[in-house]
Image (cartoon, grey):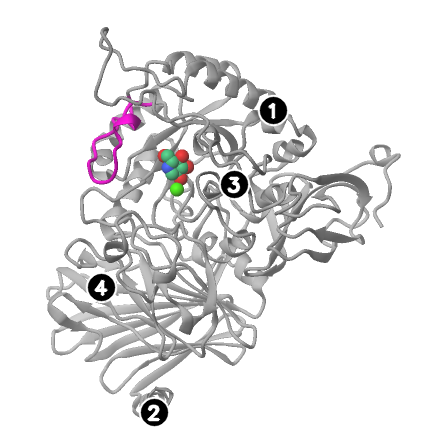
C-alpha cells in the first residue's frame, strides 16, 4: 500500500497540470492547490516546512453516481488578503483578529458544463476551505450523494476520537493510533442501535484531534455548518487516510441543495504547541458576523437547576406514574416525587437570590413526561401546559421579586416535527411569563422517522430554533444537537449546547475517566461552548439506588472546570444543600465570571492536563484553572501576565495533600497570599485533581497581614 501511494504521489507531481502555493500571513503555513491530469483538484498543507496534509482529493459525487470531482478546467483564480479585528458579543477574548490570505479557484467541468468554486483561507493557525456552487443553468436543484474531500495525514498519528455515530456525541474518547480506530468497540451506541446509527466501523466524529510523532498537533473539523449534514471522517486503516463522510437521511442521500450554495468550511488547525490549538479563533473567523441587529439583551450567566435531583433519581420529572388514568375528579394521580413543584421552585429561587446566581432552570414542569414511553411515538409534550403543582404565574412573580431569571426547559423527546409546529407557541409562552432563555433537548430517535441528529434536516431544525429564539429575544442552550461549528458568532443568542458526554453521566451512569475533561477542549469545544454542568461537591453516594457511584474528579477540579471548559453559560449543578455544606468552596462558584476580556492557555496536552488564565470582562481580575487526568502533576506557572508594580491577592482552591479522585475527592485547601507579576506559582494537582484560583488587585491596606507567596 505504501509503495502504491508513493507511486500515486509521484504520478501526481509529474502530471500535475496546474499548481499554486499560497502562504499564511507570516509564511508559517503553506497551502498547495493543484489540478491533476484528470482535472481533479487536490490540496496539501505544510507547517514550518513540515507536511501536515499530503496531497488530498477534493470534490463531490452527485446522486446516481454523477461525477462532480474531476474533468475540471480552471476558469480563473485570485488571491486576496484580509486583516481585520472584531469584537464578539461575549467570549474568551475581547477582540479577535481575522488575518488570512484567500485563494479562490474557479472551476468548470467540461463534460457537464457546470461550475464549482473552491475558496481557501490560509491563516497562521490553519487552513479552511469550502465549495461554492454558483447560480447556473446546468445546476439548479441537486442532491449530494457523497463528499470526496480527503485529509491525508503523513503517518499513523495518535488520535483522540469518538465513534462516527449519526445521533450522538455522548461517548467516552479513545486515544489510539489512527490504524487502531474501531467505532464498534465503543462503550455506547445511540438509541437506534449500531446498524442504524454507526454503520461504518471505521468512522469517527470531528473535531478529530491528532498528534504526530514529531509533536505537531492537528485538529480537523468544520465551520459554519448550515443547511448541510455534519461531516464525519472515515479512517482508511491501510493508508491511515481520512475521508469526509456526510450523515445521510433515510434514503441515504446527504444534502438537497439549490444553487447558489456554499458548503460549510472544512478546517485544519495546526501548531507545534498544544496551547495554540485551544486558543485558535479560526473556526469563529470562518463564521459570518452576527446577524442580530440588537444583542444588548444577550447576557452570559450562571444558573442552578431543579435538575441534579432528578438525574440522581431523588425526584422525578413526571408528576404522575400513571399516564392513562385519572382519579374520580378527573385529575392525575401524583407520585409524590415530582421535583418541579411550586414550593421546591421557591426554595431554589431563594437560594439563587441569596447567592447571586442569576438563573434557575426547572425541568419536568410541563405535562407529558409520564407519557414518554420510548422512541418514535412522539407528541408527548406541548411546551405550554404545566403540571397541576407548578404555578407558572406565582413562580414568575416570585422570581421577579427575588431578581432571579427563570430558564425554560423544552425537552422534545427528539420529536422535532412536533417542536417545529409548537415552537412559535412555546416562545410566545416564554415571552409572556418572563423566560429569557431556554434549554431544549432531543433525547431519542428523531421524528421525522429516519432522520438523524446530525443530518441536514436536523441541522436546519436546530438553526430554526436558534433564529426563532432570537426573534423572541430568548437565549438558547441545545442538548443532544450535532456538535457546534462556531455559529454562535453569527447567532450570539446561541449560548451553549451539549453534544458531548457531560458531567450528568456521573449521575445516571458510570461517567467518564479523569482524562475526559482534558480532551474535550481539544475536540468538542473547538466548535463552541458546552453546557457541561460542572460544580458537583458531593462526590460519592449522591445517586439514589447506586450507593457506589462516584465522581471521577476532586472538588478542586470541579471548580477548575469553570475555567478550562469555556462557556458563557455555566451551571452550578449540585444541590443547594451540598453547596451550603461547603460555603468556602462555593464562594469560588459565586465569584467566577462567565465573560472575559482575555484568555491565556498556559500549559496543555490533550488527554493529560490544561492550565488556563482568564481576565474578567471589564475588570483587572484574573482567574485560573488547572486540571489533570489520573496522574498527579506539579506545575510552575509564572504570573508574568499580571500588571507590573500592582499587588494582587491570590485565593487558591487546591487539592489537599491527601486528596485523590478515587479515595479522598472531597478534601480541599483554600489559601490566600499576596502576589505580583514576578511570582512563580507552584501548583500541585492530585490524581484526577485540579486547582482553581482568583487573583484580584489589592491596595497596601488590603494586603496587610497576608503572607507574600513564595
Ligand atoms: C438529557 C439532557 O442532557 C439532560 O440535561 C436533561 O435533564 C434530560 N435530557 C431530560 O431532558
Ligand atoms: Ca444529554
Q: Is residue 174 above or below residue 416?
A: below
Marks 1 and 2 sit apart, C-alpha to C-alpha, by 67 Å
Residue 133 image label: 4
- In the rendered image, residue 315, in percent from the top left (x then y), is placed at 43, 25
Q: Position of residue 625 (x, y in %)?
A: 64, 47
User: Would you say the residues marked 2 and 3 are in contact, meaning their CB atoms lie under 8 Å apart?
Assistant: no
Quarter-of-image position of residue 577: top right
Pointer 1 residue? 355
Q: Secondary structure at mark 3?
A: loop
Which numbered disc, 3 or 4, marks the residue that appears first in the sequence? Answer: 4
Element at label 1:
helix
Q: 632 and 246: which one is in front?
A: 632
- Give the image quarter of residue 471: top left
- Residue picked out by circle 3: 549
**Quarter holding the N terminus?**
bottom left
Q: Is residue 474 magenta?
A: no
Amino acid at each position: 500500500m505504501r509503495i502504491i501511494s508513493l507511486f500515486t504521489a509521484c504520478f501526481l507531481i509529474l502530471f500535475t497540470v496546474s499548481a499554486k502555493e499560497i502562504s499564511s500571513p507570516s509564511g508559517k503555513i503553506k497551502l498547495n492547490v493543484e489540478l491533476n491530469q484528470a482535472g481533479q483538484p487536490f490540496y496539501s498543507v505544510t507547517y514550518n516546512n513540515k507536511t501536515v496534509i499530503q496531497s488530498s482529493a477534493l470534490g463531490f459525487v452527485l446522486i446516481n453516481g454523477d461525477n462532480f470531482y474531476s474533468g475540471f478546467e480552471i476558469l480563473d483564480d485570485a488571491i486576496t488578503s484580509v486583516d481585520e479585528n472584531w469584537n464578539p458579543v461575549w467570549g474568551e477574548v475581547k477582540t479577535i483578529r481575522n488575518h488570512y490570505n484567500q485563494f479562490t479557484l474557479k472551476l468548470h467541468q467540461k463534460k457537464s458544463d457546470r461550475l464549482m468554486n473552491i475558496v481557501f483561507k490560509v491563516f497562521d493557525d490553519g487552513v479552511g476551505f469550502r465549495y461554492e456552487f454558483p447560480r447556473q443553468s446546468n445546476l439548479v436543484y441537486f442532491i449530494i450523494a457523497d463528499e470526496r474531500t480527503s485529509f491525508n495525514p503523513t503517518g499513523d498519528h495518535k488520535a483522540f476520537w469518538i465513534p462516527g455515530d449519526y445521533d450522538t456525541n455522548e461517548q467516552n474518547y479513545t486515544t489510539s493510533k489512527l490504524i487502531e480506530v474501531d467505532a464498534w468497540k465503543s462503550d455506547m451506541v445511540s438509541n437506534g442501535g449500531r446498524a442504524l446509527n454507526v454503520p461504518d466501523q471505521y468512522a469517527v466524529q470531528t473535531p478529530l484531534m491528532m498528534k504526530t510523532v514529531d509533536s505537531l498537533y492537528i485538529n480537523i473539523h468544520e465551520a459554519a455548518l448550515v443547511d448541510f449534514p455534519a461531516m464525519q471522517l472515515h479512517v482508511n486503516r491501510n493508508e491511515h487516510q481520512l475521508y469526509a463522510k456526510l450523515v445521510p437521511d433515510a434514503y441515504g442521500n446527504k444534502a438537497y441543495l439549490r444553487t447558489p450554495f456554499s458548503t460549510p468550511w472544512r478546517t485544519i488547525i495546526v501548531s507545534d504547541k498544544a496551547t495554540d490549538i485551544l486558543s485558535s479563533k479560526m473556526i469563529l473567523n470562518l463564521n459570518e458576523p452576527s446577524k442580530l441587529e440588537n444583542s444588548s439583551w444577550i447576557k452570559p450567566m450562571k444558573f442552578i437547576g431543579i435538575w441534579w435531583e432528578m438525574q440522581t433519581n431523588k425526584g422525578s420529572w413526571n408528576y404522575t406514574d400513571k399516564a392513562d388514568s385519572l382519579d374520580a375528579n378527573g385529575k392525575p394521580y401524583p407520585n409524590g416525587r415530582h421535583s418541579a413543584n411550586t414550593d421546591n421552585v421557591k426554595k431554589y429561587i431563594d437560594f439563587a437570590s441569596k447567592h447571586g446566581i442569576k438563573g434557575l432552570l426547572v425541568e419536568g414542569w410541563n405535562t407529558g413526561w409520564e407519557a414518554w414511553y420510548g422512541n418514535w411515538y412522539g407528541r408527548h409534550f406541548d411546551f405550554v401546559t404545566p403540571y397541576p403543582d407548578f404555578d407558572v404565574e406565582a413562580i414568575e412573580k416570585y422570581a421577579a421579586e427575588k431578581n432571579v431569571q427563570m430558564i425554560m426547559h423544552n425537552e422534545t423527546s427528539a420529536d422535532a416535527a412536533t417542536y417545529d409546529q409548537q415552537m412559535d407557541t412555546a416562545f410566545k409562552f416564554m415571552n409572556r411569563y418572563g423566560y429569557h432563555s431556554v434549554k431544549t433537548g432531543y433525547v431519542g430517535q428523531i421524528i421525522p422517522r429516519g432522520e438523524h441528529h446530525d443530518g441536514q434536516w436536523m441541522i436546519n431544525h436546530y438553526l430554526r430554533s436558534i433564529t426563532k429564539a432570537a426573534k423572541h429575544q430568548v437565549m438558547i442552550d441545545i442538548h443532544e444537537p450535532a456538535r457546534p461549528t462556531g455559529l454562535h458568532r453569527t447567532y450570539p443568542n446561541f449560548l451553549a449546547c451539549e453534544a458531548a458526554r457531560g458531567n450528568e453521566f456521573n449521575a445516571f451512569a458510570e461517567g467518564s475517566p479523569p482524562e475526559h475533561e482534558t480532551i474535550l477542549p481539544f475536540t468538542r469545544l473547538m466548535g463552541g461552548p458546552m453546557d457541561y454542568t460542572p460544580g458537583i461537591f458531593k462526590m460519592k453516594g449522591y445517586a439514589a439506588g447506586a450507593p457506589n457511584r462516584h465522581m471521577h474528579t476532586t472538588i478542586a477540579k470541579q471548580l477548575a472546570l469553570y475555567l478550562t471548559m469555556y462557556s458563557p453559560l455555566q451551571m452550578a449543578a449540585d444541590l443547594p444543600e451540598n453547596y451550603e455544606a461547603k460555603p468556602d468552596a462555593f464562594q469560588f462558584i459565586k465569584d467566577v465570571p462567565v465573560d472575559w476580556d482575555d484568555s491565556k492557555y498556559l500549559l496543555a496536552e490533550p488527554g493529560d492536563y490544561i492550565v488556563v488564565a482568564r481576565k474578567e470582562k471589564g475588570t483587572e481580575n484574573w482567574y485560573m484553572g488547572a486540571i489533570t487526568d489520573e496522574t498527579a502533576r506539579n506545575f510552575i506557572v509564572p504570573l508574568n501576565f499580571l500588571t507590573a508594580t500592582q499587588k494582587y491577592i491570590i485565593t487558591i482552591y487546591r487539592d489537599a495533600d491527601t486528596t485523590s479522585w478515587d479515595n479522598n475527592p472531597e478534601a480541599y485547601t483554600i489559601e490566600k497570599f499576596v502576589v505580583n507579576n514576578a511570582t512563580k506559582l507552584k501548583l500541585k494537582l492530585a490524581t484526577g485533581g485540579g486547582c482553581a484560583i482568583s487573583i484580584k488587585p489589592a491596595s497596601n491596606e488590603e494586603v496587610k497581614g497576608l503572607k507574600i507567596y513564595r
